[in-house]
Amino acid sequence: MKILIHPTSEGAVKAAALQIADLLAARPEAVLGLATGGTMEPVYAALIDLVAEGQCRGDRFTSFNLDEYVGLSADHPQSYHHYMRRHLFDALGVPAAQTHLPAGDAPDLAAEAQRYEARIAAAGGIDLQLLGIGANGHIGFNEPSSSLASRTRVKTLTRSTVEANRRFFAEGEAVPVHALTMGIGTVMDARHILLLATGAGKARAVAGMAEGPVSAACPASILQMHPSVVLVCDRAAAADLRMTDYYETVHPDGAERTGEPA
Ligand code: GLP
């Protein structure tokens, strides 16, 4: 795992956006796995800027999002469909047919989950999966105790995740308690993985992910078994890591290349 610790969250965000832009510059038709959440909002804003500056094209990729709330239609303002249009797709002008999210309002969610897996496979699999991390170590909506081999399916959200998501909903509005999410096995099939974590609230999860035992108690820890993972974080999110000296020796201030092997 390549661990890049940036002095600031702005630096970490920019680095994550640049990694996506580099891939799109090399392969505009790449298949991206995309994530939602507060952490990703500035990443998508930075990517939109990079496309506007001509660093890469932003209208040829195919994308598959990690998850969607069960029961929310694509035009619900708090749905992840809506989030993606608002924060990325509309600005880039990427054709809707190239972007995919699971349908949280499908009448048969098990069939929808299977269809989603089949669509990813038909696209040739995911080249780069972008991930955030929940404070309890979840990725997508794979809560602790999720099977590390799981595929796309419905998951019940933990009380702490529901509470964390409440900030995105209007006061008094019901916050969904189920989601349709790619499984951990689905995420692990991606050829490359980029996990971004910023802020002190993620410090415990980041330490569990990178240095803890591989365990369903911290679903992100399975990434230790993936051959191509980059963790980009800021100093606050890196605060509980034990081997920071080493990571900063290899990649000072999160620098990608130092002349030393990673
Ligand atoms: C939700 C999403 C995850 C995201 C997590 C953290 O659970 N399903 O993909 O990583 O929230 O979100 P935030 O970036 O807002 O902390």
Image (spheres, helix red, strand yellow):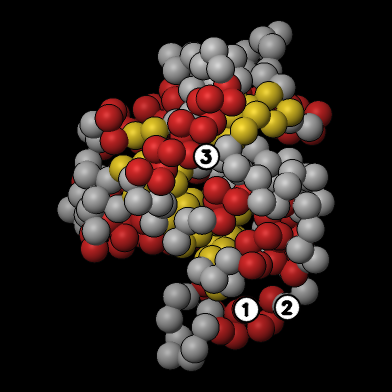
Left or right of 109 on screen, residue 34: left
Q: Which class describes the residues within 10 Å of circle 1: few (<14), some (14-19), or many (20+)?
A: some
Which label was assigned to residue 168? none
Residue 209 place in picture, x, y as percent:
71, 60
Which residue is situated farthest in the bottom direction here?
Answer: 260
In the image, what residue occupies the spot 69% across and 12% down? 174
Dot 3 beta carbon under 8 Å from ligand 1: yes
Mark 1 element type:
helix
Say if mark 2 contacts mark 1, CB within 8 Å.
yes
- The vertical placement of 15 against 66, above or below, is below
Residue that carries the numbered disc 3 in the rendered image: 66
In the image, what residue occupies the spot 28% across and 28% down? 96
Specify which label sits upstream in the sequence, 2 or 3. Answer: 3
- The vertical placement of 165 against 10, above or below, is above
Residue 225 visible in the displayed image: yes
Instruction: Compare residues 18 and 122 and report the one nearer the observer.
Output: 122
In the image, what residue occupies the spot 44% across and 25% down? 81
Instruction: Compare residues 229 and 84 and report the one nearer the observer.
Output: 229
Say if mark 3 contacts mark 1, CB within 8 Å.
no
Which label was assigned to residue 247? 1
Which residue is situated farthest in the top direction here?
Answer: 172
Residue that carries the numbered disc 2 in the rendered image: 243
In the image, what residue occupies the spot 63% across and 62% down? 223
Q: CA–CA distance between discs 2 and 1?
A: 7 Å
Mark 2 element type:
loop
Left or right of 88 on screen, residue 206: right
Of the residues shown, which amino acid type is indicated by label 2? Met
Residue 169 place in picture, x, y as percent:
62, 18
Front: mark 3 or 1? 3
Front: mark 2 or 3? 3
